[in-house]
Image (cartoon, rainbow, N blue to C red):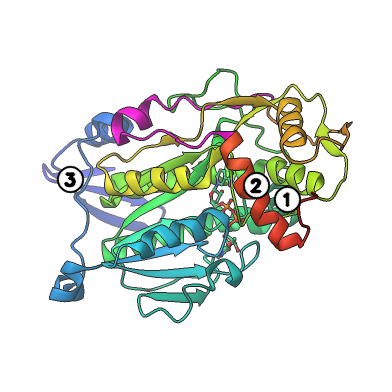
Amino acid sequence: MYCIDASSVMFLVRSHCYLIQKPEKGILEMAKEVSHGGENNTSIKSPPEPSPLRKAKFFQANMRILVTGGAGFIGSHLVDRLMENEKNEVIVVDNYFTGSKDNLKHWIGHPRFELIRHDVTEPLLVEVDQIYHLACPASPIFYKYNPVKTIKTNVIGTLNMLGLAKRVGARILLTSTSEVYGDPLVHPQDESYWGNVNPIGVRSCYDEGKRVAETLMFDYHRQHGIEIRIARIFNTYGPRMNIDDGRVVNNFIAQAIRDEPLTVQLPGTQTRSFCYVSDMVDGLIRLMEGENTGPINIGNPGEFTMTELAETVKEMINPKVEVITVENTPDDPRQRKPDITKAKELLGWEPKIKLRDGIPLMEDDFRKRLEIRRKK
Ligand SMILES: NC(=O)c1ccc[n+]([C@@H]2O[C@H](COP(=O)([O-])OP(=O)(O)OC[C@H]3O[C@@H](n4cnc5c(N)ncnc54)[C@H](O)[C@@H]3O)[C@@H](O)[C@H]2O)c1
């Protein structure tokens, strides 16, 4: 290395010669700033300016919102709520892997609604103000079906949506998951817990995929000033869930309606907390509209063992069915319960619908779709 003058440094690397302007701050100083990122990061840029198009009168009065995965369970309920506001235009992109046009058929043809068949692993350019990024299969049966595609959806899909947010200056919300806590060693789980995740297990495409997606969100926020929001969603249930996708509430309800035994995975003492979908949608909208990046847990802290859940479904829907035990799947977390202190304090949010009030609403929907009437 040869020094030319005080402000320039010349490096000789093999046969190449690079002339580099000496930075105003020392390299070490800059590295320190970066490594102290997180909460005290001084290098967060302000969000990019929206495009001139969005400064036009129409766009100031109206909000154009993209919902990826909007044909799915939570996404379609979110779309319903967003469409209630006449100032919102909603664009859904979905590849229909686990979602269905049926969930949105009541909006097709509406002047404020657009539905696009699109896979988020491919780039997308649309002029929007907000992006709710939900696209990703949520049920283990589906996300394990093609794990490479699942991780691509989480990583490349999120990169594409962040690229879009950067380009058009949109605020972006990621629906992350309680699975980022893995098989948790702290209980209940608050957002400061870093998790206990198997990086090479059969669920890792989902858990680790969402963890990388969260990392990307924060890196885009720190590096490019993108406005981000991260929701860590705990088990959610309600009408429009896929009937046979293996998630526990739908499983039990469908089995009870069909007069089949309720299959509890061993040991049956593992716990989950269940949030009704209208509460979830309310939490997501509050997070998007608020000033906090998150991550914020959104879920119902009411905790049930799988055996308790099966007994409740049996009692409410079909007292004649048996409850039996079956083998469990690898890496099934033993307990899950959100600490929602942050959601309460920062979003003024807490769930309103109790499990015993939500189950009959889901039963009605499943009976309609299965065409099985209640017995008299
Ligand atoms: N439901 C829950 O209990 C729960 C819990 C934690 C996190 N989440 C998260 O919430 C989001 C929605 O979950 P859900 O329960 O509605 O699941 P869902 O499977 O019903 O919906 C996901 C939607 O994304 C679409 N999709 C999947 N891959 C895609 C791709 N590559 N390109 C475009 N669209 C794609 C599907 O077709 C579907 O419409 C997911 O991100 C999930 O990880 C859900």
Check disc 1 and report the residue beneath it. Answer: 144
Q: Which residues are magenta?
A: 334-355
Residue 331 seen from this side: no
Q: CA distance from mark 1 to mark 3?
A: 50 Å
Q: Nearer the viewer, residue 273 or 17?
A: 273
**On the image, which quarter does residue 84 sit in?**
bottom left
- Label 1 close to label 3 by CB (< 8 Å): no
Residue 116 locus on image (x, y percent): 49, 76
Q: Nearer the viewer, residue 236 or 85?
A: 85
Disc with the residue nearer the chain's start (2 vs 3): 3
Nearest-to-viewer mark from 1 and 2: 1
Dot label at residue 205 = 2
Count of numbered circles on the image: 3
Residue 50 locus on image (x, y percent): 20, 65
Residue 300 seen from this side: yes
Check disc 3 and report the residue beneath it. Answer: 22
- Label 1 close to label 2 by CB (< 8 Å): yes
